[in-house]
Image (tube, rainbow, N blue to C red):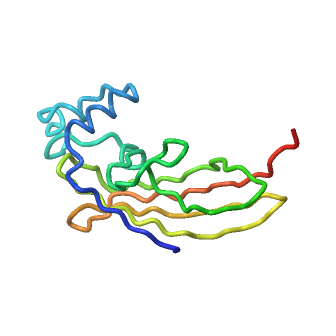
Amino acid sequence: MNEVTYTAPEELGRAAIRYFAQAVGDANPLYTDDAYAREHGYDGVIAPPTLIFETNQFTGLPRDPDGYCGHTWDLAFPGTRLVRGGNTYELHQPVRPADVITVTWRLGDIVRKAGKVFVTSTATYTNQHADLLAVNEETLIYVPLEDP
């Protein structure tokens, strides 16, 4: 499977936005105060920019043995362990409480280099109107296990 799509079962919601802003220590009133957000050109509160990349509310997946309940490719490269290689984020428009988020993950390249395996994939986030919200290009690296 080289592509998978998940759609949230409900709107993102103001509470999720508020909780995320608190969790990351961002007290910007754009995330909690409608009047303030309107004064700054929005039609109400918006989500902190990275919330869309960090929420698993749209997947509905069970937790894996490590407790993670988000998307994985379930790739197996024996004798390796997975490390995150990085992400490149593109933000196209603010995410709002009423947005129902859909994410489509596409598996990109799998490249072996210097004893490691580099896996790239792209996640495209849209709302219920098919408006592009954001894109996340992710690199995962499978590195050889060290000898004990």
Viewport quadrant of the C terminus: top right
Extreme left residue here? 35
User: For this view, does 123 lie left or right of residue 10?
Assistant: right
Extreme right residue here? 147
Percent of width and height locating residue 92: 35, 57
Compared to 36, does 132 lie above or below?
below
Extreme front residue here? 65
Observer-nearest of 42 and 117: 117
- Residue at screen point 22% across, 36% down: 15
Observer-nearest of 69 and 26: 69
Q: Kindly indicate the quadrant of the structure image that contains residue 41.
A: top left
- Residue at screen point 38% across, 25% down: 25
- Residue at screen point 36% across, 43% down: 51
- Residue at screen point 42% across, 49% down: 53
User: For this view, does 23 lie left or right of residue 120?
Assistant: left
Percent of width and height locating residue 122: 50, 64
Percent of width and height locating residue 65: 54, 45
Percent of width and height locating residue 139: 61, 56
